Image (spheres, grey):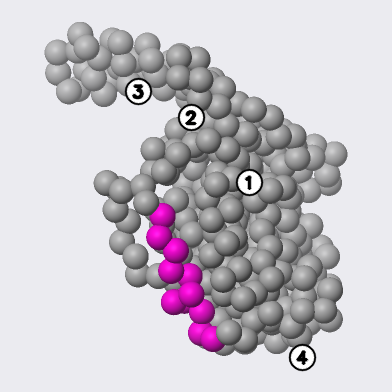
Amino acid sequence: MNIFVSGCKQIYSTDFSEKKVTECKHKTFTSASLELDKNSPFYPKRGDEKIMRSDTAMAVVAVQQLLAEAGIKISREETALYVASGVFIENIEDHLGHLMRALEKIKDAKTEADKINLIFRASPPLLALQTLTNSTMSFVAQYVGIKGNNATFGNTSLSGFHALEAAVAEVTYTDNCAVVVASNVGGEYSFMMNSSLYPHTEGWKESGAVGTVLLTKKPTPNSLCRITQMATSTHLPNLHSTAIQRNWKNLLPDTKSDAIIHSGAYTEAVFQADDSYCKKLNKPTASFFTANGNMGSANVLASLQKGIDMLAEGRSCIDLLDRDIYGRESAIRIEALK
């Protein structure tokens, strides 16, 4: 495998704050949302923005910036688009009132048809459009004009690996370029969905993020690195256990790399345990957890950007390791341009 990363554009959250989940159990976590760049010439039209999550809107901006800065002309008719999409409800507090009232009325419904009708009437009109799994892909394709092969993967950090893997296969077996997008909301809905799958929630930190990458079969003047290895575990999720098992070393082909970047932790304690594990592989380690927390579906592309920065500083080979909320692990090797 020898595929070139010829463009990389990431957008991160910066306004971290403590979020309160419940008063009675004093549950809190740290989170940050994406800031909308409404002054960007690539920002979506106002009518479309109303039905977009923040990650979708900024993905539209990021992909257009990516291609504008790529330095090469691509055929948008043939270019492939693969998207990793994270958890889907943003600003859940805006919808809870409607849903709670529907659940109250369901108790008195006499038939299944009556129950469905009550839920339908109580659901906010825009909720379905805002929570579509393929919302980001649809709007990016619409605004950027990409019309090649496409797919959306969701909704954990493993989706970022699979989107990149599909793009690598596309570029390998065709003469097409491929764009990979990862968009993550984070926030209260993510915490409520994912925290029950974790050993503990103390020190929980996550954030919204958008990542984009342009892959090409041949190097371009703006190429940044090569992807040379990809592997993922065959671990089957066990929803009855919250234990974390670390088997990343089984995914590494050798000890050639001179640094490891790891992601997947949601809490400080798990991050420290991950870092200790990776240090035992006798490698310098790095992670974006301290600065950004867990970025869900955007984890893998965020690590790719961090790896590119380290290659620019003089390293030659870096392994990117990730673990999703269900314990599924992945490994990607990137190397400097020859």
Amino acid at the residue labelled 4: Lys
Is the residue under label 4 in contact with that under label 2 (CB below 8 Å)? no
> Which tag, 1 or 2, sits closer to the chain's start?
2
In magenta segment, residue 102:
no
Give the distance between the C-alpha atoms of the residues marked 2 and 3, in whole angstroms.
11 Å
Left/right of residue 196 with respect to residue 269 in the rendered view: left
SS at circle 2: helix
Q: Label 4, on which residue?
A: 338
The residue that disc 1 covers is 293
Marks 4 and 3 sit apart, C-alpha to C-alpha, by: 58 Å
Q: Residue furthest bottom?
A: 338
User: Which element carries disc 3, helix, strand or loop?
Assistant: helix
Residue 159, compared with residue 78, is above or below; it is: above
Indicate which label's residue lies in the foreground, 1 or 3.
1
Label 2, label 4: how many angstroms apart (C-alpha)?
49 Å
Residue type (three-letter) at the residue carrying disc 3: Phe
